[in-house]
């Protein structure tokens, strides 16, 4: 009996000692489970499937581990960390800021971005200059967020400051309510504010509610840090390679220049002008394999979808084609909307084919758009300047820093094609990216052909 007991104990100890680590469990399962929240800045289901900054980052990590990604949104923000703590998720990727309270229960990976908590109001309403102007007002905030903690501390300093923590509403919904004047104020991350201004241009940030906060993935505290260590290694690798900065640029690089008037006009034209040409953009998309929303965004940047548009230099129509370009793509009437859109789509594809195939999307598309505007030769000049000065000529975020130099003699005399108004293609691409993002958001519940963007 004693021998059997000793053998049994030895077997149990051996079994426990050989228990797979958290990282091994993920790989054996073939699935990485990540809890998040629904927001434009984190995770949402678009017309082509899951999207968002956190989704892209988590999907890359899952690919690094060789497993599938199972990313799911909690019913509300307050549930995210309890779900993680219960073991239903391997980690949380939800735009979580690192706070002292959270660090008592969870361990955070390396920061990959930062936000500023902002008090948001609607244009046309009095702008609060500071917390003292909020006495007697009600501020809405997402329950369980770090902003709720900040407002609780602020309420101890400002008499009559009131706030309501919303359990059922996500950040995007609160911002929509502010835009609709259903609530006077809300507190949200600066990234959420910037993204939502594309859809609700009346939103304004009154002031920052505290200092900038780093964002990171959250993990359960455990003696087994195998998955955490793998995530740390992954994030640091992305940072070294410049890929992390590229992901940030992809999602937020075009949100810095917000133009209220232009955004309002665009939203109005989406309702009044786009319906007349949408089918043609979709037809051109089928013929060229380009997302119709990208073609529509390109057309809007060129002409505001005005079929009779004429520039001082003689380019005409919705896609603003020159006579030579029109002939090159087989178009005999640039003012015919149908022909102009088809011709512009063909020309864009011709330009894009000149961009080296090794360049990954979406950068390849941004390069093609820049070349559509300034010419492929000038784009190549900027890429050469970028490489000479230690930048990556295959990354838009690097090349866009050198394009404006083509208007300065010191720089353009070093190039093959000479002077160009190099700032214009940078603004051109940024504008199209904003229009494209808005169109993708407006059509997020539609079924659309897969896109590289």
Image: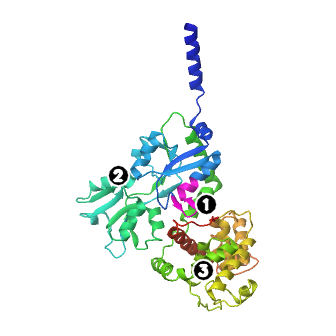
Q: Position of residue 133 (x, y in %)?
A: 28, 66
* Residue 327 falls in image quadrant: bottom right
Q: Nearer the viewer, residue 194 or 50?
A: 50
Q: Position of residue 174 (x, y in %)?
A: 38, 63
Asked if labels 2 and 3 touch by Cβ distance under 8 angstroms, the answer is: no
Q: Which residue, given by chain and number where applicable, does mark 3 sit on?
A: 299
- Left or right of 340? Residue 254 is left
Secondary element at tag 3: helix
Secondary element at tag 1: helix
Q: Nearer the viewer, residue 79 or 104?
A: 79
Quadrant of the rendering where the C terminus is positioned: bottom right
Disc nearest the viewer among 3 and 2: 3
Magenta residues span 44-57
Q: Position of residue 72 (x, y in %)?
A: 50, 51
- Left or right of 325? Residue 60 is left
Identity of the residue drawn at 45% across and 40% down:
86
- Left or right of 276? Residue 177 is left
Q: Is residue 182 positioned above or below 71 on the image?
A: below
Quadrant of the rendering where the N terminus is positioned: top right
Q: Which residue, given by chain and number where applicable, does mark 1 sit on?
A: 246
Disc nearest the viewer among 3 and 1: 3
Between discs 3 and 2, the one toward the N terminus: 2
Mark seen at residue 149: 2
């Amino acid at each position: 009996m004693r021998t059997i007991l000793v053998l049994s104990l030895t077997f149990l100890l051996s079994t426990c000692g050989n228990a797979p680590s958290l990282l091994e469990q993920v790989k054996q399962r073939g699935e990485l489970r990540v809890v998040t929240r629904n927001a434009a800045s984190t995770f949402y289901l678009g017309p082509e499937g899951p999207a968002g900054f956190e989704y892209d980052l988590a999907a890359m990590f899952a690919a690094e581990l060789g497993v599938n990604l199972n990313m799911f949104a909690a019913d509300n923000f307050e549930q995210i960390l309890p779900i993680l703590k219960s073991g239903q998720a391997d980690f949380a990727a939800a735009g979580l800021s690192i706070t002292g309270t959270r660090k008592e229960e969870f361990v955070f990976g390396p920061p990959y971005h930062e936000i500023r908590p902002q008090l948001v109001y609607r244009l046309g309403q009095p702008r609060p200059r500071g917390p003292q102007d909020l006495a007697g007002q009600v501020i809405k905030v997402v329950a369980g967020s770090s902003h709720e903690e900040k407002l609780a501390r602020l309420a101890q300093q400002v008499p009559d400051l009131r706030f309501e923590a919303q359990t059922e509403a996500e950040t995007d919904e609160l911002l929509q309510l502010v835009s609709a004047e259903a609530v006077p104020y809300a507190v949200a991350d600066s990234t959420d504010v910037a993204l939502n201004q594309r859809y609700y241009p009346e939103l304004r940030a009154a002031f920052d509610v505290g200092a900038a906060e780093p964002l990171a993935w959250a993990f359960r505290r455990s003696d087994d840090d195998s998955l955490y260590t793998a995530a740390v290694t992954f994030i640091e690798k992305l940072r070294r390679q410049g890929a992390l900065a590229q992901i940030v640029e992809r999602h937020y690089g075009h949100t810095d220049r917000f133009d209220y008037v232009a955004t309002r006009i665009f939203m109005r034209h989406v309702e009044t002008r786009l319906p007349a040409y949408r089918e043609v953009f979709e037809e051109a998309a089928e013929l060229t394999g380009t997302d119709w929303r990208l073609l529509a965004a390109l057309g809007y940047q060129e002409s505001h979808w005005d079929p009779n548009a004429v520039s001082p230099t003689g380019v005409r129509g919705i896609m603003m084609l020159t006579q030579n370009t029109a002939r090159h793509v087989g178009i005999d009437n640039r003012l015919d909307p149908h022909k102009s859109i088809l011709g512009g789509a063909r020309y864009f594809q011709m330009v894009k084919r000149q961009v080296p195939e090794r360049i990954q999307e979406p950068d390849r598309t941004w390069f093609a758009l820049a070349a559509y505007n300034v010419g492929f030769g000038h784009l190549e000049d900027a890429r050469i300047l970028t490489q000479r000065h230690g930048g990556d000529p295959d990354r838009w975020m690097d090349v866009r820093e050198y394009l404006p130099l083509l208007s300065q003699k010191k720089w353009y005399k070093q190039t093959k094609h000479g002077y160009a108004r190099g700032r214009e293609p940078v603004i051109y691409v940024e504008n199209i990216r904003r229009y494209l993002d808005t169109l993708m958001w407006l059509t997020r519940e539609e079924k659309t052909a897969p896109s590289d963007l």
